[in-house]
Amino acid sequence: TTVCTQSREQKKIIMKFLKETGCGDVIDNGLHLFKLHDFGFRGVSSVESAATGGAAHLVNFLGSDTMVSLMCIKEYYNESIAGFSIPASEHSTMTSWGREHEVDAMRNMLIQYPKGIVACVSDSYDIFVACEQYWGTELKDMILNRDGILVVRPDSGELPKIVLDVLESLAGKFGTSNTPTGHKLLPPKIRVIQGDGIDINSLEMILKTMTAAGWAADNLAFGSGGALLQKLHRDTQKCAFKCSYAMINGENVDVVKDPITDPGK
């Protein structure tokens, strides 16, 4: 319940900033349902908690790497496909090529996945070299001629500054257009995903900062791991199962407390 509630609140925040920055078409086309991706499987306490928490997130969104949640929903709710994912690199698949061959690892991602959306972590060594020299110069033509979208993933740096810095670096090489509200939007062939340090508070902070700096919300998607599925407890939303009704000597009795020291309880 708490995972689902927080996920829904983040969905409302994302939709708010999409509308405010002239990206209402994203909502109209249902693409906002892929703006918060579940990265949480490895950060939770058990396979069961990954399944139930991941299923709760999928009430609100369609993007998930927590495959056990898809299995759970298929088993108990007869939903054949409750969520989707995309090809995406991680640091080990990039750094195993060696520092001097990072650009070759990036090129390989584009070759192996010539169509559709593909995400590539880009901060293994120098995120700005990756954005400006590799993606923005050596591989630029491949990206623009590709039948799909490259999603650049920074995975370190101070929030929200790193998001703005990456957007500016990519804009310097790929250019931007303006949404109906005058906010800057990267070309449709390239986007950014921020998956480091994302919870409901940082997500809103980033979108507020982007908006103030003149960037459209559609430039960015989010990934959230432990904060989505694990960084919560029964008091996060004051949620617990308790007795609220009893029948005593054949009479219905509401069971409720009202402590003077904490009316919130």
Image (spheres, rainbow, N blue to C red):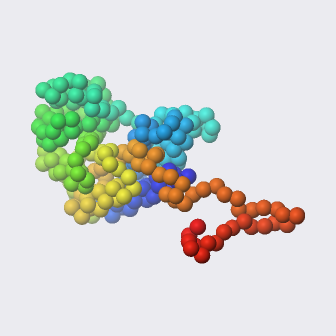
Q: Is residue 24 visible?
A: no
Across and down, in percent, residue 259 comes to 61, 72
**Residue at the spot x=71%, y=62% of the render?**
244
Across and down, in percent, residue 92 comes to 28, 28
- Residue 56 vs residue 131, the one in the foreground: 56
Across and down, in percent, residue 117 comes to 33, 37
Drawn side of residue 69 relative to residue 151, left or right: right
Q: Is the residue 181 above or below the residue 104 in the image?
A: below
- Residue 31 vs residue 249, the one in the foreground: 249
Q: Is the residue 150 above or below the residue 7 in the image?
A: above
Q: Is the residue 198 above or below the residue 122 in the image?
A: below
Drawn side of residue 260 relative to residue 164, left or right: right
Q: Residue furthest front?
A: 261
Determine the image quadrant of residue 239: bottom right
**Residue at the spot x=88%, y=64% of the render?**
249
Q: Residue furthest bottom?
A: 260
Q: Is residue 196 visible?
A: yes
**Residue at the spot x=18%, y=51% of the render?**
165
Drawn side of residue 232 relative to residue 112, left or right: right
Which image quadrant: the C terminus?
bottom right
Drawn side of residue 5 relative to residue 162, left or right: right
- Residue 233 vs residue 201, the one in the foreground: 233
Q: Is the residue 60 above or below the residue 250 in the image?
A: above
**Residue at the spot x=56%, y=71% of the render?**
262
Determine the image quadrant of residue 84: top left
